[in-house]
Image (tube, rainbow, N blue to C red):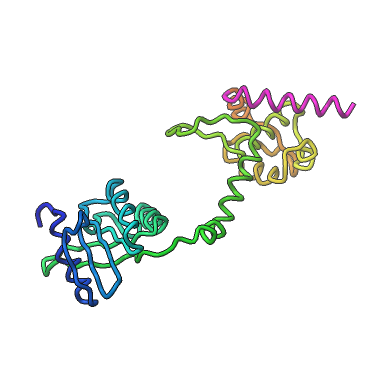
Amino acid sequence: MGKILEVDLFYPIQNYFKIIGYDVYGEVHHCDVAAVKDDHLIIVELKRSLNIDLLIQATKRQRLTDTVYIAIPKPRFSLRSKKWKDICYLIRRLELGLIIVSFQKSGAYAEVKIHPGPFDRNKSMKLSKKKRDNLLNEIKGRHGDYNVGGSTQTKIMTAYKENCIHIACCLEHFGPLSPKNLRELGTGDKTLSILQKNYNGWFERVKRGTYLISEKGKNDLKLYPEIVNYYYKMIRETETSSL
């Protein structure tokens, strides 16, 4: 099939709603499709692709009825993809419905993917509680703001990376230490896991239960002068308070 136009979406959608008992009309007071059964009004807005104009148009139609759908041709990308799931989330968040129209050799047909309905924000937040807790824990684990919002293709300073730097600073300053010694210096509960996994190659085990900083670790610390200075100041304060 050649280029799909908005008018190509109309007849499959008209047919779908007629089958379930609606009277269907095209272009009524700037609404692409209006379907009526008894006192129930459905409005459908048609577009060749999902875009912000379509969403604005559809949400404005919610002034007229709670039952508003947007209709687009079936996307070429997978309906199992993260992109599609994110699109569906946004549509549900806006309390809209979604219809996709498939064009095949046997003809075009409409399929309702989402019916309009209230969005339960409290339920959504409860389901995302773990993600919220992880975000807050990440913030608590950072001791400065070393990242620029919106950055791409740049390494992000995370709480985990800061924890690695803290451990490396302690080992560079004090020499070989055990995980217990490091935790006493304030490196936290993840100390042993960080040393064992050694993702950055910063640590070496000199004997069972004792670690030192590797040459790579010493060189890499030079890349983070601001954070290293923060932890060395903390180490000096710890030494002073113990005197």
- Locate residue 29: give its quadrant: bottom left
Of residue 8 and residue 207, the one placed in the foreground of this image is: 8
Residue at the spot x=20%, y=61% of the render?
A: 33
Task: Please state if 141 lies on the left or on the right of 56 as rendered.
Answer: right
142 or 191: which is nearer to us? 142
Residue 116's image quarter?
A: bottom left
- Horizontal side of 233 relative to 114 (left or right) equals right
Q: Residue at x 59, y 25 (%)?
A: 224
Q: Of all residues shown, which one is farthest toward the right?
A: 243
The stretch drawn in magenta includes residue 61: no
**164 vs 5: above or below:** above
Overall secondary structure of the magenta section:
helix
**Residue 9 percent location from the top left of the image:** 17, 60
Q: Nearer the viewer, residue 84 or 163?
A: 84
How many marks the image carries: the answer is: 0
Residue at image position (28%, 46%) is 53
- Name the side, left or right, on which 134 lies relative to 103: right
The answer to whether 196 is drawn above or below residue 201 in the figure is below
Q: Position of residue 217 (x, y in %)?
A: 62, 30
Q: Which segment is the magenta one? A: 223-243
Membership of 239 in magenta stretch: yes
Residue 129 % position (x, y): 58, 55
Quadrant that contains the C terminus? top right
Observer-nearest of 9 and 174 = 9
